[in-house]
Amino acid sequence: QVQLVESGGGLVQPGGSLRLSCAASGTIFSGNVMGWYRQAPGKQRELVAGLTSGGNTNYADSVKGRFTISRGNAKNTVYLQMNSLKPEDTAVYYCKLRQTFKDYWGQGTQVTVSS
């Protein structure tokens, strides 16, 4: 069983920054893919950023140049550094781990960008 716990969300003014963290525990295999998704009210959940165990990344066009995904030294932790935040970034952000053809999700953390 795999558990994911996100942290770091909150309220920030436009132009500000936040850093989200996701810690994975349980049986974690090498070769997994971790990523961040978000879901705004009334919208579908969308990919924000993904990161393979080999270090390859991909980003949604809307966050390129502003957000950075990275892994911690423990490899079971993934971060999302969010800079130059905009009101349209407001959403619940979810961490996902994919391994052995299964997807595991965290409970989500709220990010609100507002003045």
Image (tube, grey):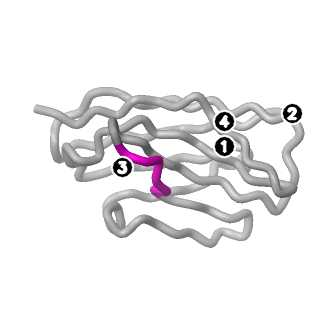
The quadrant the N terminus occupies is top right
Amino acid identity at mark 2: Gln
- Read off the residue under disc 1: 77
Q: Image check: 38 left or right of 101?
A: left
Give how far across and how far down residue 81 sits, in percent. Answer: 42, 49
Q: Earlier in the sequence, mark 4 or mark 1?
A: 4
- Read off the residue under disc 4: 23
Q: Image check: 41 left or right of 48?
A: left
The one nearer the camera, 43 or 27, is 43
Amino acid identity at mark 1: Thr
> Which residues are drawn in magenta?
43-48
The one nearer the camera, 13 or 41, is 41
Please name the residue shown 43% across and 48% down the image.
44
Please name the residue shown 47% across and 47% down the image.
45
> Between marks 2 and 1, how big is the CA–CA gap?
16 Å
Q: Earlier in the sequence, mark 3 or mark 4?
A: 4
The quadrant the C terminus occupies is top left
- Read off the residue under disc 3: 82
SS assignment at label 4: strand
Please name the residue shown 66% across and 36% down the image.
23
Question: Where 80 sits versus 60, above or below?
Answer: above
**Marks 4,1: beta carbons within 8 A:** yes
> Between marks 3 and 2, how big is the CA–CA gap?
29 Å
